Image (cartoon, rainbow, N blue to C red):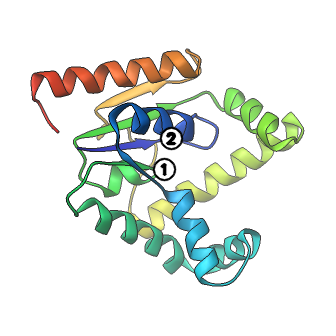
Amino acid sequence: MIITVSGPPGSGKSTLSSRIAEHFNLELVSSGDVFRAMAKENGVDLEKFGHMAEADPAIDKEIDRRQVELSKTKGNFLFEGRLSGWLIDADLKIMLKTDVGVRARRIAGRENISLEQAMHDTMVRQESEAKRYREYYDIDISDLTLYDLVIESSVWDQDATANVAITAIKSMKEKGLRG
C-alpha cells in the first residue's frame, strides 16, 4: 500500500504521517528527511543547503525523483511532502488543509518565534513554493481535486485528525478498493 500525506507548513503533515505509518506498519518517507540526507551527502548544513536549493531547481527535482523512484519499488510506504500527492501514484492521497492563522500559531510555538514572524515567514514561503511548483512542474498547489481525502486539520486536534484518516484507510482496505 502507498499513501501520500500533503499539506502546507504547520498543517500537521508530520504528526499525521507518523501516526498512520505506525498504525499500518508503513515505511515513512519524508521529503524533509530526503532534503536532510542530501545536505549531508553534499557536506553542508541545512541552512547552506537551503540557499543552494533556492538557487538550483535541480535540488528540489532530485528530492522528488528519489521519492518517485522509491514509490515504484514493492513495499508499503507513506510519503509525506507538499508535492507527494502530485508526483506519486498512491492508493490513497490525503491533503491537510489548515487556516493560515492556525498554521502560523503552530509554527511560532514549535520554532519559538513571534506569531507575527511566523505569519510573515509562512506567507513568504507559501508564495515562493506556489511559484516554484508552477514553474518546475506546472502544478497549481491550490488544486485539491486529485486528493482522495481532504481534512481541515484546524477543526480537530491531532488525535481526531489521525482517527479520521485511519478510519478512512481501514474502510478502504476492508472494501478492497485499493491497497
Q: Residue at x 76, y 30 (%)?
A: 105
| Furthest residue in direction right, as rendered | 114
Point out the image quarter for the C terminus: top left
Front residue of 33/10: it is 33
Q: Would residue 131 be visible to someone looking at this image?
A: no
- Residue at the spot of label 2: 7
| Furthest residue in direction left, as rendered | 176
Q: Position of residue 58 (x, y in %)?
A: 49, 80
The answer to whether 155 is drawn above or below residue 57 in the figure is: above
* Mark positioned earlier in the residue sequence (2 or 1): 2
Q: Residue at x 32, y 18 (%)?
A: 167
- Residue at the spot of label 1: 82
Point out the image quarter for the N terminus: top left
Asked where in the image residue 177 lies, by quadrant, the reply is top left
Q: Residue at x 88, y 42 (%)?
A: 113
Residue contact between numbered discs 2 and 1, judged by CB atoms under 8 Å: yes
